[in-house]
Image: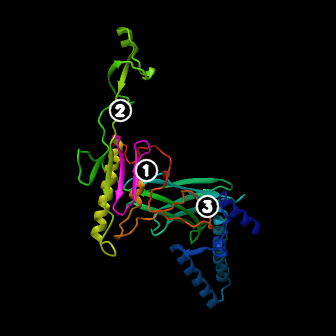
Amino acid sequence: MTQKASQTSADRAGPGQPLRREPPKRARSRWQRRLKATREGRYFIAITFGVGFVGILTANNLLYVLLGMLLSLIIVSGVLSEASLRHVRVTRRLPQRAQVGRPHLVEIEVFNDKKRMPSYAIEIEDLRAGQPADKRCFFLKVAPGSSQVAAYRRTPARRGLDRYVAFRVATRFPFGFFEKSREIELEGDLVIYPAVDPVRLPMGQDGMAREGMEVARRGSGDEILGLRPMREGDDPRDIYWKRSARWGSAVVRERAREVRAQVTLRLDNVHAGEAPEGYELERFERRVREVASFAVAHLRRGDRVRVEATSGTSAASSPASGADAVLRFLALIDLERPGDSGAPHVRLLSDSPPEPPSTPRRVTSDPVPSRPLVVAPSGFGLGEDER
């Protein structure tokens, strides 16, 4: 048994990472069970005690037999419910992106590793840190050596980081008198992007500055400015053969330089005092949503976007890379006190593994990682009705 536990820990450790062994208390937690009587179970227990009490007073052998049958049902219920919970594994598949106000699906897959006995009436409850458990998936029967998949729909109400910590696996099999449950630890994280509203982009906005605006000049863009005689050093691929044949000399297309704007959006995330007031938090959330809406609108138009916070942190996105960097930055940013060096980097479980313990851990002031959160199309933030 010790060798098997060591192999499991070795499988969890990534390449080049030190072996992480589970502490004894965590290893014994998989045997812990919680038992709760249902409403029918409380009635059943009351009837059992009543039959036993009357049987003792009257010394009736038939009541003793009935009492033994009732007690045997309790024992059978405990044995069968334990058999349903044994050797059950649960995994979770989170979406690539999630956004406030937009529903997303979380898939739950249950594996029954038993060879002969199926698991009946399995109820899975997904647990998140600091939030009440409100979503459950029910599996009527999971055959031995197989798996089943179910999903629940969730609509986030606030931006930020959701930490998934464990599953609560419960069953009321076979009689529904008791609910036996256990917890299976499985961590996961999901960044909730702020909501994005459709906005129009006028020429000027308060709190927004355009930088690097260029005019149409000669370059290598797709737009054609005109035609001119070919000169030394021109690219032969730009020769306009129809006009060259008509004029009797080589004529090339004169292309325009691509026009693209650099847009800077500024976000004030500094508050006065030790802790922000309620109205400051509400105003800050509205401002985050507004900045996210303008950032996505500019990216749709083809502009490069940079979001700068007054605390010193920033993030940048382009139409080629998509809005993930900016939206993730806005999802994790928070109000800070004056003089703070910026919000620390939030390490996600989906990011690269942490550095070995021998190397001192670095804390950077930029919450935007050097690579995007996930690899996906760049049009996120634009609803199906907005594309």
Q: Would you say 347 lies left or right of 72 here?
A: left
The kind of residue tagged 2 is Arg
| Residue under pointer 2 | 257
Residue at mark 3 = 120
Residues shaded magenta: 301-326
Secondary structure beneath dot 2 equals: loop
The stretch drawn in magenta includes residue 305? yes
Residue under the point 56% across and 53% down: 149
Q: Residue furthest front?
A: 232
Q: Quadrant of the N terminus?
A: bottom right
Using the numbered discs, state the Cα–Cα distance from disc 2 to disc 3 in whole angstroms. 67 Å
* Residue 219 x/y as whole percent: 37, 30
Dot 1 amino acid type = Asp
Going from N to C along the chain, the mark reached first, 2 or 1, is 2
The picture places residue 58, in percent across and down from the top left corner, at: 63, 89
Marking on residue 324 = 1
Locate residue 350 relative to residue 334 in the image: left or right: right
Task: State whether residue 126 appears in this view.
Answer: no
Q: Is residue 47 left or right of residue 225?
A: right
> Observer-nearest residue: 338 or 383?
338
Badge 2 or badge 3: first in the primary sequence? 3
The Cα atoms of the two marked residues, 2 and 1, are separated by 27 Å
Q: Residue at x 58, y 62 (%)?
A: 354
Mark whose residue sits in front, 2 or 1: 2
